[in-house]
Amino acid sequence: MNETTELLSKSRLGAELTKDEANKLANLMELRELKSGEQLIVEGTVDDSLHVILQGNVEVAKRTAGGIANIAVIRAGNLAGELSFIDGEVHTVGLSTLSDTKVLSLSRTDFEKLITTDPLLVYKVMRAVTRSAHRIMHQMNAEYIELNNYIFKQHGRY
């Protein structure tokens, strides 16, 4: 098992893949090393890549009228760029590294080649992507409820 396959197997994307499936997917992925402060995804751009954060932390930020709003931090093992990987739409947030970071990137074009040759692998990858999006939605819902409770139960007092 090569390094990329091993790293992939330890991530959320590779969690339910067999060794052969992880190896097949890893062969389609690019291992990237980014320095602290580099951008993984630029807000407002289109790219068709799914990213697995292997090492380091990545900040999610959105440009607003008042400047930059820091939304979240993506930690090692998690995915990034899931929705644009699926739908090809413009990224609505930017991702910048907070430390030296290792990332595995998978282009949708390369991934789609597996649809006819290995549909079970495609299914497992899409389940992992869906789980990641579901986890994010669950977290956002919990934060919304917490904020709502704070505002209405505390009557907006700080």
Image (cartoon, rainbow, N blue to C red):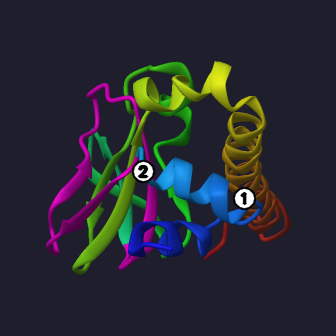
Q: Position of residue 45 (x, y in %)?
A: 26, 28
Q: In this view, does 132 lie to the left or right of 91?
A: right
Task: Tell me, yes or no, if residue 13 can be seen here.
Answer: no
Nearer the N terminus, badge 1 or badge 2?
Answer: 1
Question: Which quarter of the image is occupied by the C terminus?
Answer: bottom right
In the image, the segment drawn in magenta is: 29-57
Q: Please report the residue visible at 54 percent of the width from the left and 49 percent of the height from the top.
A: 24
Q: Is residue 12 visible in this depiction of the protein? A: yes
Reading the image, the residue beneath label 1 is 17
- Amino acid carrying label 2: it is Asn
In the image, is residue 47 above or below residue 139? Answer: above
Q: Residue 27 carries which label?
A: 2
Q: What residue type is labelled 1?
A: Leu
Residue found at x 85% / y 67%: 153
Q: Is residue 95 magenta?
A: no
Tell me the residue at 28%/74% (across/down).
101
Check if residue 47 falls in the magenta segment: yes
Please state which of residues 36 and 54 is positioned toward the viewer in this rendering.
54
State how many labels appear: 2
